[in-house]
Amino acid sequence: MTPFGERVRSLRDAKGVTLKQMATDLSISSAYLSALEHGKRGQPSPQLVRQICAYFGIIWDEAEELERLADLSHPRVTVDTAGLSARATELANRLSERIGDLDEERIEAILAILDAVPPRKGTRRRVGVRRR
């Protein structure tokens, strides 16, 4: 499951809407919506994120948060460490090898460390998306 899919599912459950009904209302297939919720499809389009926000009456900060979650929800990520230190490359590789072994407590601890590091000014995210 992706952060975006988890949030959409919780919004849908809170509203008491079935997956099939929401898909029909948004003019998308229920298979596609299910795949988005379960992280089996890539990031949703910005247009679909806006449709979902409108569907649930989400505005302002909550809409921005849903957009942020959509950006962080591609299930197949590549990390470009070109130009970074050898240790940074090692970190990326070891994380890719071991991420499936981490429990939720350790994942939360790693995320807290990352959240505490301010992004460098004038740099782009070094995370890319591999499309198949």
Image (tube, helix red, strand yellow):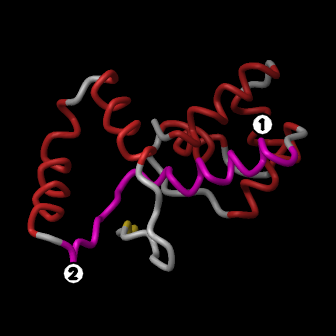
Residues 121 and 25: in front is 121
In the picture of the structure, the residue carrying the numbered disc 2 is 83
Under circle 2, the secondary element is loop
Residue 71 placement, left or right of 91? right
At horizontal 81% and vertical 48% (from top left) the residue drawn is: 26
Q: Are marks 2 and 1 in contact (CB under 8 Å)?
A: no
Residue 87 appears in the figure: yes
Residue 38 point in image, percent of width and height: 49, 37
Residue 17 placement, left or right of 110? right
Residue 131 appears in the figure: no
At horizontal 69% and vertical 31% (from top left) the residue drawn is: 19
The kind of residue on which mark 2 rests is Gly
Residue 116 point in image, percent of width and height: 43, 44
Foreground tag (2 vs 1): 2
Q: How far apart are marks 2 and 1 (CA)?
A: 45 Å
Under circle 1, the secondary element is helix
Q: Give the mark, 2 or 1, whose residue is nearer the N terminus.
A: 1
In the picture of the structure, the residue carrying the numbered disc 1 is 22
At horizontal 86% and vertical 42% (from top left) the residue drawn is: 55
Residue 47 placement, left or right of 6? right
The kind of residue on which mark 1 rests is Met
Q: Give the range drawn in magenta.
A: 59-84
